[in-house]
Image: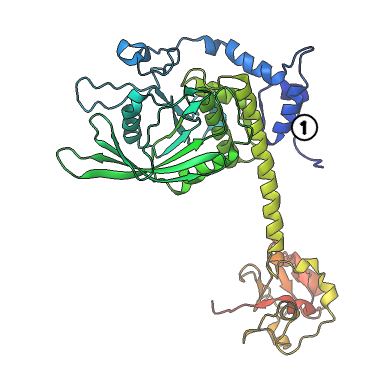
Amino acid sequence: MQTNGTPINLGTFLHSTRFPAFLIEDRIEALKKMSRKGSDKDGITDEFEKLHREPESQLYISCKDGRKPENIFKNRFKNIVPYDHTRIKLDTEGKENVGDYINANLIEILSNDDKYIDFYGLKRKYISTQGCLENTVGDFWRMMWQERSQVIVMITKELERGRVKCYRYWPDPGIIMRSGIKDELIIENLEEQHFDHYIRRVFHLSKQAKDSENRIGPRKIYHYQFLCWADYECPTDSVEALMEEVNRCSENEVENNVGPTVVHCSAGIGRTGTYIVIDILINLIKRIGGHCPIDITKTVKMIREQRATMVQTEAQYRFIYQAIAAFIKLSKASDEERQRRNRSHASPLSSLPSTPLHQLKHLKLNGNISPCDLYHNITPSPTSLTTSPSSFPKHDSANMSSNLSPGTVGSLSFPPFLQQTETPIVLLPPPPPKKNFQQKKAQENVGTVLPEQHKAYMTPVDQNR
């Protein structure tokens, strides 16, 4: 049990929504204990309901563009339209009768706002959008090209409970599809891999050059379709596996300076918002560590300032807690496993402290073979130690100077476990008169003294280096 750390006032811990990430399981348990009598509502329910009652949630934010007559038919749901100030505006390329509207918003980390200073330094961008309609597929691919996005996270099936949730906007494997304003965008499905909970697809996206047969591009697009997250519900299995794969792809496979990750479900607010909040918090914890403060309520507020009604249900809000707790637990297990592997793969010299040096004193030097050689079958080099006392420094100021490199004395280098000390180490033959020795030890600020027989554990140093 850990007995040190920072004391926490439990009253503050419960009434504040900000807490250290590694204490998330404690917070969940505390919030569950705040259940109301005769009701299944608890502290997590209270947090979610309070989000809707706060003054910021009641402020009117302009959504005029999404309600224009020419744009209404591009909305999957009449009451879910993008905020004007963060909506993605498509390039019309100077063409008449071509609109700039798509039901999509840019979601950024608002760390310049004092309210969200905890996110400072975190660079994450997303485009939150609805599932495609048949008449918005061209707009979707225009957005992908314009914003230079290379990763799509689709958190819906095309059909759920007999209802179309998203029109299929990509071609089958090996098929080429054209889209855009005048079929200038070319999409090719290069590969499709099916996993337990998601499908990974790789597309090529290119653009037909004007007045030419040449193509601009292609760009690789990575498409992840999550299959186990139904509308208004939460996945029974953790979503971290999908997120890790998406983040691995974003870090290792996509080009530098690419655009935002595109995330969509059906409406582009419930599952989409939940995914984005979890991804932001996980990346914050990865960046700072388990001790970093997180605030789930504030994170939801931040993305709601950029797209309406993000994280739509209490179940989705509760799932954020569960997903972060699962991530913390998995991280702890991974750290423990990594430490175990590091211990088992430790270098021979660094493992020597587990065998006390005094237990090896009976081993005698045999020519150029040292006890370390006997233990680890190391063939001695021509410069290996001999029993000659000439290799030991004399007790004068020249040989006790501090001009030697760290971890060395004379022609000897020390194994790693002895090099970790920050004070000088001096290897001495049979001691000189006690008075002179103590005086020199004090003058040179010597922290560790090794007796002569310990030379067997030292490795020769090439002084010509």
Label 1 neighbour load within 10 Å: few <14, some 14-19, many 20+: few
Picture coordinates of residue 391 (x, y %)? 68, 84
Picture coordinates of residue 195 (x, y %)? 54, 44
Q: Determine the image quadrant of residue 3.
A: top right
At x 72% / y 90%, what residue is drawn? 367
What's the residue type where badge 1 is placed? Pro
Picture coordinates of residue 205 (x, y %)? 32, 41
Identify whether 80 is placed above or below 221. above
Secondary element type, mark 1: loop
Looking at this view, is 142 or 14 the one in front? 142
At x 66% / y 37%, what residue is drawn? 326
Looking at this view, is 244 or 6 the one in front? 244
Q: Residue furthest front?
A: 162
Residue behind mark 1: 7
Q: Which corner quadrant holds the N terminus?
A: top right
At x 79% / y 73%, what residue is drawn? 437
- As drawn, is 249 to the left or to the right of 140? right
Picture coordinates of residue 188 (x, y %)? 33, 42
